[in-house]
Amino acid sequence: MSLRTLSVKAFLFLGLCQVGRRGLASAPELTEQPKKIAVVGAGIGGTAAAYFLRQEFGPAVRIDVYEAGTVGGRLATENIGGYEYESGGSVIHPLNLHMKHFVDKLGLSQRADVPSRMAIFDGKELTFEESEWFIVNVLRMLWRYGLNFLRMHLWVESILDKFMRIYQYQQFGHCFTSVERLLHAMGGDSFLTLLNNTLEETMLANGFSQAFINDIVTPITRVNYGQSVRLPGFVGAVATFYEVNYVGESGPAHSLYDIVIVATPLHQDLSDISFSGISPPISSHFPGRYHQTVATLVLGQLNVSYLGTEQKPSDFTFSDILTTDSKALAINSLSSLDPAHMPPNYRQQPASQTKVWKVFSHGPLSELQLQELFLSREQVRERRWLAYPNYRTPQRRIPPFILHDRLFYLSAIDWAASAMEMSAIAARNTALLAHHRWYSQTDKVDQEDLHTRLRGEL
Ligand SMILES: Cc1cc2nc3c(=O)[nH]c(=O)nc-3n(C[C@H](O)[C@H](O)[C@H](O)COP(=O)(O)OP(=O)(O)OC[C@H]3O[C@@H](n4cnc5c(N)ncnc54)[C@H](O)[C@@H]3O)c2cc1C
């Protein structure tokens, strides 16, 4: 990856001239190495794609990464009181193997665990308070929701088991031309059903109670997806190349590429990339909008009485307050934040102390709402994200990974689920697709029954 081009402020644009274009399989020159590959977007998806492209195509190919805003995209921090705090994506599951690999590769380390406690707020009072004692939590859950918790654990495990198959497929070089095929290869029809039914429908069908879904599952989806979820441009290809047009530090420029990967959502309000001269034409915006999530980081003292509790602030040690689906609520969640790089001997303080809180909400918080939530505010930082697709069921048609012969769309994966690991999985899939299509290796693309066939290879 070229570090120089990473800093380029790029304005994209697309145009593809069909004249003289040849079919991929019949183009003998394509059995030679590609010379130049462009990746548009330097979020985790685009940077991971550059990494995997390097693995697939070797050191000789030039890989340029274009970024219109800030490297990192939806991963970002805010500096408050001299410490960095995450305002975008922050949590990696221990089984997110690509992300774990990047953490190791970059010599980073996992942040030390800070004990945390969760509570659930319904707009009037705290309806659930996690105890410091595991056994107390288990007994409370059993009392209120019977075996729902155990069932949830087993259900998530079985989904995770299937999800993990993708790593084996990718290890063996397999890739998929659409999000649907990728999901089907992992979990069969059951994964496609997950796409097209609401979580509530699926959970009810799997025997979960409505009370458990409302009280426990909805608050989790509200904090994770906020839901019950620049630059005018133009890339052109002449003959067998794609021409990327952009505005760099010294003005408008263009460059020719053998392969282009678009690693930013092509949706209204999010992208000014346009494609021209491509047949069949590619629309610059796919249907569907992204959902606004506002992250407000406040260094201040929480007003615990807002949460309908009579606990003294010095006794209030909940770090995460999730919320039920209540129209009256202005916030989706409220969390006490720890710095990204924790100083030695760092300990979370109770709510009586001035500390950093992160509020997620659909819209910006008004002065009045901030006054209600906080007794004092020393610093306030607001970050408005177009965070995730507005998910709905049945799921609209998911955009394809392949926009044109060697023009790929990594961010299609957002419509299955938006998370760092999903972008990394799509990055590896796209790098493999680009490689196999370039070298016409069809036996590694869209293969059926991989789970059964690869079992013998272990
Ligand atoms: C508030 C919030 C909380 C989240 N929490 C989590 C979490 O805890 N765990 C988790 O796994 N995920 C989380 N996510 C989701 C996760 O952050 C995203 O799924 C992931 O970062 C997407 O990465 P990406 O590279 O695919 O897209 P993006 O990060 O959106 O990157 C796209 C990049 O392309 C650039 N770009 C756009 N147009 C152009 C152009 N014309 N030319 C050049 N560059 C362009 C953009 O500036 C951007 O940098 C969260 C997201 C948000 C917003």
Image (cartoon, rainbow, N blue to C red):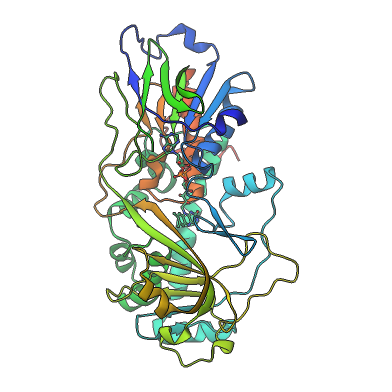
**Residue 295 image offset from top left, x and y in percent:** 44, 62
What residue is shown at x 49% (from left), y 33% (from top)? 9
Residue 203 higher or lower than 237, as above or below? below
Residue 452 higher or lower than 232, as above or below? below
What residue is shown at x 38% (from left), y 72% (from top)? 367
What residue is shown at x 49% (from left), y 26% (from top)? 38
Q: Is residue 431 left or right of residue 269?
A: right
How many numbered tags mark residues here? 0
What residue is shown at x 31% (from left), y 41% (from top)? 267
Q: Is residue 269 left or right of residue 342?
A: left
**Residue 256 image offset from top left, x and y in percent:** 46, 16
Q: Quadrant of the N terminus?
A: top right
Q: Quadrant of the C terminus?
A: top right
**Residue 114 image offset from top left, x and y in percent:** 64, 71
Residue 182 higher or lower than 342, as above or below? above
**Residue 199 image offset from top left, x and y in percent:** 33, 62
Pick the front one: 360 or 80: 80
Q: Is residue 453 visible?
A: no
